[in-house]
């Protein structure tokens, strides 16, 4: 099923990634720092405000640098290291501060993962456009490329299996309607055709080029 511990499921589902800002209603939310995200636990009022408005207010925290060296002994894990650190600084020793772990000792904590390489399937997007006042073709093509690159990235993260990825002409068209530089468009093609593209197993869609006529 889809049940489990949220702080394990969210990274597994691709819902948290490097550069994200994440808040949660419990102290373990800071787990996502391991993924390069800023994440923190907040109180119920802040959580409700974030859910209602999508906004929250933070003071930029000062950072504590922790440099690890050497190799851990037998049966010593990262949990032992962090518990020792908490014992040194106290449970409130990093109150409203971030912690950055560096040093060659970080690589010796025994975290292992397997990554499967994906091949980029290049897609060229072409269409005729009526540009908004003040925009050049180059500017419109750059905005289109950036928007579609972000869309392809979300598509890969949100699709359960690689074989289920579909780049739909209608979805690309919907993205075009959100661009500030494009008032209207016609004749949209993907790799010269008007059909949806299924990259297939081991492939992910990437923007090869954008050509506006």
Image (cartoon, rainbow, N blue to C red):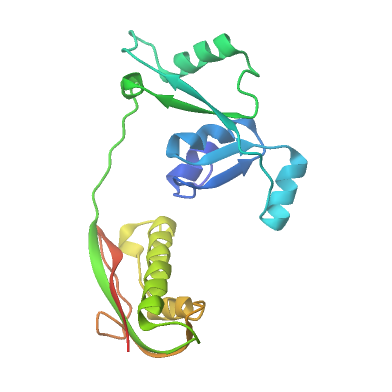
Residue 20 location (% of width, % of height):
51, 47
Question: In which quadrant will I find the C terminus?
Answer: bottom left
Q: Quadrant of residue 124?
A: bottom left
Identified at 35% across, 78% down, the residue is 138
| Residue 4 seen in render | no
Number of numbered discs overlaid on the protein picture: 0
Question: Residue sitting at 38 percent across and 80 percent down?
Answer: 169
Q: Residue furthest right?
A: 45
Task: Tell me the quarter of the picture where residue 87 sits.
Answer: top right
Above or below residue 131? Residue 27 is above
Is any atom of residue 90 visible in this view?
Answer: yes
| Rendered location of residue 172, percent (x, y) | 41, 77
Of 162 and 47, nearer the camera is: 47
Give the residue at the far front of this rendering.
134
User: Is 45 above or below relative to 204?
Assistant: above
User: Which residue shows up at 51% across the image and 78% down it?
Assistant: 180
Q: Is residue 36 left or right of residue 7?
A: left
Q: Is residue 169 left or right of residue 24?
A: left
Q: Using the image, determine if residue 62 lies above or below residue 71.
A: below
Within the image, what quadrant is residue 198 found in? bottom left
Please tell me which residue is depicted at 24% across the width and 54% down the height of the picture: 118
């Amino acid at each position: 099923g889809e049940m489990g511990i949220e702080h394990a499921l969210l990274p597994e589902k691709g819902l948290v990634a490097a550069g994200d800002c994440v808040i949660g209603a419990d102290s373990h939310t800071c787990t996502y720092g391991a993924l390069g995200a800023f994440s923190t636990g907040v109180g119920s009022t802040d959580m409700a405000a974030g859910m209602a408005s999508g906004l929250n207010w933070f003071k930029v925290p000062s950072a504590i640098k922790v440099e690890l060296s050497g190799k851990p002994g037998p049966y010593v894990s990262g949990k032992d290291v962090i518990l020792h650190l908490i014992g040194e600084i106290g449970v409130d020793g990093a109150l409203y501060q971030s912690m950055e772990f560096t040093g060659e000792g970080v690589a010796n904590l025994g975290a292992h993962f397997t990554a499967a390489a994906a091949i980029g399937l290049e897609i060229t997007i072409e269409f005729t456009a009526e540009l908004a006042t003040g925009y050049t073709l180059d500017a419109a093509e750059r905005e289109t490329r950036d928007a579609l690159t972000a869309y392809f990235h979300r598509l890969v993260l949100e699709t359960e299996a690689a074989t289920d990825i579909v780049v739909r002409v209608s979805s690309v068209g919907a993205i075009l309607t959100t661009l500030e530089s494009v008032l209207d468009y016609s004749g949209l093609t993907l790799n010269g055709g008007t059909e949806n593209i299924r990259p297939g197993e081991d492939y992910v869609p990437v923007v090869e080029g954008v050509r506006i006529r």
